[in-house]
Amino acid sequence: MDIDKIMQLIDKVDASGITNLTVEEGCLKISIEKSKGQAVAVEGNQEVCVPVTQIPAAPVTVAAPAVPASQPAAESGADQTDDSQAGEENAVFITSPIVGVFYSAPGPEEAPFVKVGDKVSKGQVVGIVEAMKLMNEIESDVEGEIEEILVENGQSVEYGQSLFKVK
């Protein structure tokens, strides 16, 4: 059995609803098994490499809602003894939608997407979070000025962690 026939079998299994197929031809036995619609394994005395294509997730942006000025700090849950919280009533935070590694620029030798003092608009890319070898663009969903960048380039970030403070 030649490689083209094996690839045709793999394509047929992938396109169908079946999850496994075993074919014997002479001394060659080929088992094709599909798991969760992605992995394809071939056993026998020939090796076949089948790439699994991943579709990158759509860019996701998340920002914490601003606390209304009329709402007292005690009701908003702000800790008045924490100096880092001072003046954040009017600030909005752009947070990480996923766990991964934050990058401030599109490449190692390139300029960062934004710097402190830059004006940002809705939909503007402000950074990248790499998760499972996929680069996820972080877009601002607010208009304003970058007041503070809260993470370093190459730093691991958690889901919901604040990345930028926007005023």
Image (cartoon, grey):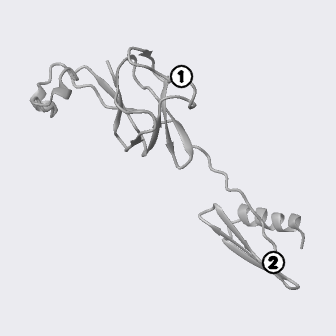
Of 31 and 115, which appears nearest the observer? 115
The disc, 1 or 2, on the residue closer to the chain's N-terminal end is 2
In the image: residue 23, left or right of residue 150: right
Q: Is residue 135 above or below residue 104?
A: below
In the image: residue 157, left or right of residue 47: left
Of 50 and 114, which appears nearest the observer? 114
In percent of width and height, residue 117 lies at 38, 14
Q: Is residue 153 above or below residue 54?
A: above
Q: In terms of image quadrants, where is residue 30?
A: bottom right
Mark 2 surroundings: few (<14), some (14-19) or many (≥20) residues within 10 A:
few
In percent of width and height, residue 150 lies at 34, 30
Of 121 and 48, which appears nearest the observer? 48
Q: In terms of image quadrants, where is residue 167?
A: top left
- Residue 57 in view in this figure: no
In percent of width and height, residue 137 lies at 52, 33
Q: In terms of image quadrants, where is residue 106?
A: top right
Instruction: Please state which amino acid type lies under the numbered disc 2.
Output: Asn
Circles 1 and 2 in contact, beta carbons < 8 Å = no
Mark 1 surroundings: few (<14), some (14-19) or many (≥20) residues within 10 A:
few
| Residue topped by disc 2 | 45
Of 92 and 99, which appears nearest the observer? 99
Query: Circle 1 sits in a helix, a strand or a loop, which is it?
Result: loop
Disc number at residue 81?
Answer: none
- Residue 130 in view in this figure: yes
In percent of width and height, residue 108 lies at 56, 31
| Residue topped by disc 1 | 111
Query: Circle 2 sits in a helix, a strand or a loop, which is it?
Result: loop
Instruction: Report the residue at 25% width, 19% height from top.
Output: 90
Instruction: Please state which amino acid type lies under the numbered disc 1.
Output: Ala
